[in-house]
Image (cartoon, rainbow, N blue to C red):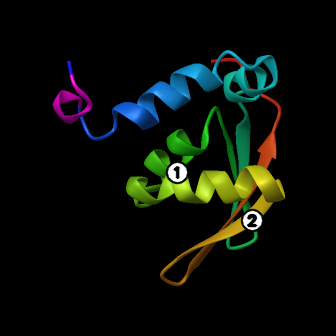
């Protein structure tokens, strides 16, 4: 198989696969965190993942990945949805 026959994302996929061999990268990717949510200053609850929180709150699920990346760096961030403000805070993993 030549390089032209391989899918366009082959090199990216190969790089990601190889990056899992790094123990530091592997450990960070395996970490799971829950989130605590305040809605307009009132406690809404805790969720096993940011995705589950977005889904339960009716927030746009397609925006959870970019927001999750920022939230992991900051540990606490607001998410604006119209007139509503949701304050997300990373917490230790919750038991499912």
Disc 2 element: strand
Question: Picture coordinates of residue 94 (x, y %)?
Answer: 73, 25
> The N terminus is located in which quarter?
top left
> The C terminus is located in which quarter?
top right
For label 2, the residue is 77
Count of marks overlaid on the render: 2
Q: Is residue 29 above or below residue 12?
A: above
Question: Picture coordinates of residue 42 (x, y %)?
Answer: 73, 65
Residue plotted at (51% across, 53% down): 64
Judged by depth in the image, the label closer to the viewer, 1 or 2, is 1
Extreme residue in the bottom direction = 83
Residue plotted at (68% across, 28% down): 29
Q: Is residue 3 above or below residue 85?
A: above
Residue plotted at (74% across, 27% down): 25
Disc 1 element: helix
For label 1, the residue is 65
User: 35 left or right of 62?
Assistant: right
Quick one: label 1, few (<14), some, or many (20+) residues within 10 Å?
Answer: few
Give the extent of the magenta segment. Answer: 2-6
Q: Quadrant of residue 87?
A: bottom right
Q: Quadrant of residue 71?
A: bottom right
């Amino acid at each position: 198989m030549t390089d032209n026959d391989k899918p366009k994302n082959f090199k990216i996929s190969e790089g990601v696969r190889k990056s899992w061999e790094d123990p530091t990268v592997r450990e960070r990717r395996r970490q799971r965190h829950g989130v605590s949510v305040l809605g307009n200053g009132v406690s809404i609850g805790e969720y096993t993942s940011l995705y589950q929180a977005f889904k339960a709150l009716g927030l746009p699920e397609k925006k959870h990945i970019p927001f999750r990346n920022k939230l992991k760096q900051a540990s606490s961030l607001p998410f604006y949805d119209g007139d509503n403000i949701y304050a997300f805070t990373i917490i230790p993993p919750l038991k499912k």
